[in-house]
Amino acid sequence: MNYLWKITSKVKSNKKVVVASGVAIGIVGYFSYKYFSQQNQIMEIERITKIFQNEKESFQQNSKEIKLLFESIKNLNDSIPNELIQEIISTFSPLITFENFKTDEEACYFLFEILQIFCSKIDSVKEIKWDDYILSISKNMDFFIQQKQTEPKIADYEDYIAKGIKILAEIVRITQKRENVELILKNTQKETFYKLFSGNQVQISIEISKLMTWMSEYNGEVIKELTDEKFLVKLIEFLSSENEELLANICSLLRDIVLNNPKTIPIIMKNNTVNILKKLLNSKSIEVKCDSSLALSTIMKKCDLETSEFDADPNLLSIILNNFFSEKESAKKSSLIYSGLELIYSLALQSNKNKESIRENQFFPYILRCLEIRNQRINKLTIRTIKMLTTNSKVTHNVDEFLNLNLLEIFTAIIPEIKDDEILSDIEAIIGDVAFLSEENRRKIQQIGLFDFLLQNLFSKNPSVQSKSVCAIANCLLSMDLQLELLKNNLLPQIIELLNSDEPNSRLGAMLSVRHLAVLGSDPPTQIWAENASILSDLHILTAFVRLQEKEPKFQQWILESIFHLSKHPKFQQEIQKYTSTFKV
């Protein structure tokens, strides 16, 4: 600092140098002040922490210090060392008790504010252990249940407990540690969860339902352990609540219960839950709409009961269309579309009748429009929904409708941008189903480059992509033009290689491909068939058939059919005699 002052003294005549030097002094001074200020606040935090470490029984005398502690922690923001954060959590978590609450409510609320600050920074302090806090809140939840009838001030304590549970839920959500969930379960009685959940205090019900949802996310056994008929009935009663946050939490929890324990479905079904959830689809709250739709779709997917409650009637489809696929822009638009798609997928899963209803109610353009959204989660579900709506020979009208809406052209446009192998394999399956239906479809697939896309994926390192590719190619090879395309690309050796694949679907696709090459155009023999047969002979297809028959005895009929037609080619006539006993020709 003195050095800078000497420089400025010598250059008083140069105003620019003076100004620059002054700025430099100011910057150095500011950062020096900030550094020493931070150090002072850290020393203050350490001082207060040591007070409570050394005088654990003197909360009443020292509770005012907790406000000072909160101010210092708030001001320091991210500058507190992790070791000190751990020390603070371990020191102050045990102070969260009913007795201390009665002594100084304000100080106890400041304790929660401190923990909330640390909780919001869990991403950067993953190594922090929250055991002391979890143990403290678990004990206090039990105490709250025991004392509720006897303490006159217990009503004030409800907000306090709700705040504690809220932080607990955040800890479970952000740390994502199974051991934290297990520690909560170990130290909290099952009856405590029930009583807290089903009490008259809405905020506690909100926070405990949120806690249970996050606990089940990282340990599905939680749901099996904590849910029985009594709990489920109470849960369903809450679906009539007017509190939107509670409604959304209950729907989310209901979904997790069904997902982790499908045995609860009969209880859920007999309590009119499906119809209640359908009404909630019309809620003004986007969260309630989304969570009720996800709960409803999960019940439909997991339920093996036949019921008219899962019919895609025009009224339900109208509700879905207006609430989830409207043109209104919204910050939560992606969430709404995803939830709506889940419902459509789940309805289509129920029956072909529902698939027809979805088409008749003009849903297909809205579904295809979802592919314009650059969101991988939505794109994956959209493709899966299209696949569900088209994969069945009895719903060919659905395929035609999608083709009229340029489905194949849309695939051509989006495929280069797709990095997810699961989406690619689903697209391949749809192309294969489309190819199976008509020569016109196969011609279109070739014209817009989708057959080339399938051929490229024969070499995919992903077994699912590769198997779906060869199965789709098998259907494309019903066309002689596409057989010729395969020959031009010299890819028949790769098809033969897949006959020996470890992936059953790859073996199936390869077998069907060879069968089409061997049978189609053999009577009378065409030039393409003759070329195919000659190459199959050069590739020792009969030896490949011997190995395949051992792995897949159920393919024998196709193998025999292929051999019968290939025997018309001169190259095979002598060779087949060697395999007469092997194939029982």
Image (cartoon, helix red, strand yellow):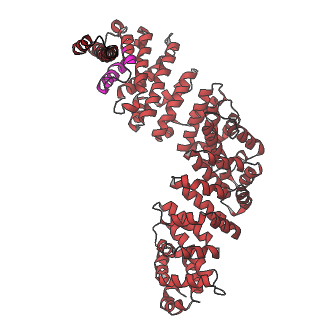
Horizontal placement of 3 versus 221: left or right? left
Horizontal placement of 21 versus 270: left or right? left
Name which residue lies at 61% across and 39% down.
334
Name which residue lies at 52% across and 26% down.
207
Magenta stretch: helix, strand or loop mostly = helix
The part of the image, by quadrant, that contains residue 258 is top right
Above or below — where is 451 with respect to 200? below
Q: Nearer the viewer, residue 92 or 234?
A: 92
Name which residue lies at 61% across and 52% down.
383
Name which residue lies at 51% across and 17% down.
159
Question: Residue 579, can we see it?
Answer: yes
Where's residue 529, x and y in %?
60, 83
What are the residue bounds of the magenta stretch?
Answer: 72-94
Q: Which quadrant is the N terminus positioned in? A: top left
Where's residue 309, x and y in %?
71, 44
Above or below — where is 372 with respect to 389? above
Where's residue 147, x and y in %?
47, 16
Horizontal placement of 181 versus 87: left or right? right
The part of the image, by quadrant, that contains residue 140 is top left
